[in-house]
Image (tube, helix red, strand yellow):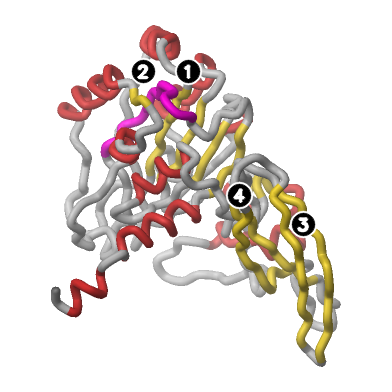
Amino acid sequence: MSVNQHRLEGFAQFGRKVAAEGAVLLKNEHSTLPILKDERVAVFGRIQNSYYKSGTGSGGLVNVDYTISILDGLKASNIAKVDEDLVSIYEAWTQNHPFEKGAGWGQEPWSQVEMEVSDELVSQVAQRNDVAVIIIGRTAGEDQDARKEAGSYLLTSIEEDLISKVSKQFKRCVVVLNVGNIIDMKWVEQYNVPSVLYVWQGGMEGGGAVADVLCGVVTPSGKLSNTIPIDLEDVYSTQHFGRKDYNFYQEDIYVGYRYFETFAYDRVLYPFGFGLSYTSFELKTQRVTLDEQLMSFEVSVTNTGSVSGQEVIQIYVEAPQGKLGKSLRSLVAFKKNQCA
């Protein structure tokens, strides 16, 4: 075995672990997740077989030996029983609607054309399955910043129709977002979607990582690294973003969540640092020490639920405004803890 081969051992497995731990669970009503042993699962959405492992541009052009799709991951889980008849319908449709790669470097479209579904089809599928998984995909990357357009930041009408029809027929329905950045989320309440999971773009093992989270092999422990606003216009930087000639960085020091914490806390759907779990935790501050300019916190984390999981302790500071002003609240430390 060469030195390079030796160094590469375990990288794929580690990548799968990182992708699974980075998934962010935003909502989980009716015990939709995790999928239990031998439960029947209907997978909707063309991205089930076209997993976005990475963004467009130079990142998307990285050559890998394989890419595990979300459908592959679910089939290999030995937990979920995937509805093969529905899989065949999507496979037949995608043969006539192949994945569009664009006309050149970095020109892949933000999203792919989705298959329309009828009420009759969804009703038939619902009668023979326990859980529905709807997969929505978006690319991102160089020259592919999200725009307030259908198929980019916004859902397309076909995607909205798919979510609406499936969430009406399935009590347990999860929308899985295989995306490179946050997208509009007003549809969660509009269509009363029971469960939502951001899985981002997890690399060549990403589909397996998604299946690990969906099936409870891994309990979700990711937290949002962005604020999800009510409207895109609520993000202060969007007013002058995207010009080709020049730009105004008018947000000053109030970048990202700092702006919302300071000026627009009422324009937030899901806050920075938010993320649910399949279990619950009790956090207690045991000790706070101050040594000159260093402050230390000793925090106990107790798993009060029925499955193992990890929780992220987040420390925020509210500093005096001073003469120049500061954001109302800033994240200064965090640590993830494993709890049996």
CB-based contact (under 8 Å), mark 3 and mark 4: no
**Which amino acid is tagged 1?**
Lys
Question: In this rendering, does residue 73 appear at all?
Answer: yes
The earlier-in-sequence mark between 3 and 1 is: 1
In the rendered image, the quadrant that contains the N terminus is bottom left
The earlier-in-sequence mark between 3 and 2 is: 2
Per the image, the residue denoted by label 1 is: 165
User: Helix or strand or loop: what does disc 2 sit on?
Assistant: loop
What is the spatial separation of the Cα atoms under label 4 and label 1, in whole angstroms? 25 Å
CB-based contact (under 8 Å), mark 1 and mark 2: yes
What is the spatial separation of the Cα atoms under label 4 and label 2, in whole angstroms? 29 Å
Residue mark closest to the camera, 3 vs 1: 3
The earlier-in-sequence mark between 3 and 4 is: 4
The earlier-in-sequence mark between 4 and 1 is: 1
- Magenta residue span: 36-49
Position in image of residue 42 (x %, y %)? 39, 23
Position in image of residue 126 (x %, y %)? 44, 13
Towards the viewer: 292 or 284: 284
| Horizontal side, residue 26 vs residue 296: left or right | left
Q: Residue at x 72, y 58 (%)?
A: 301
Marking on residue 117: 2
Q: Quadrant of residue 172?
A: top right
Q: Residue at x 40, y 32 (%)?
A: 79
Position in image of residue 263 (x %, y %)? 76, 59
Marking on residue 303: none
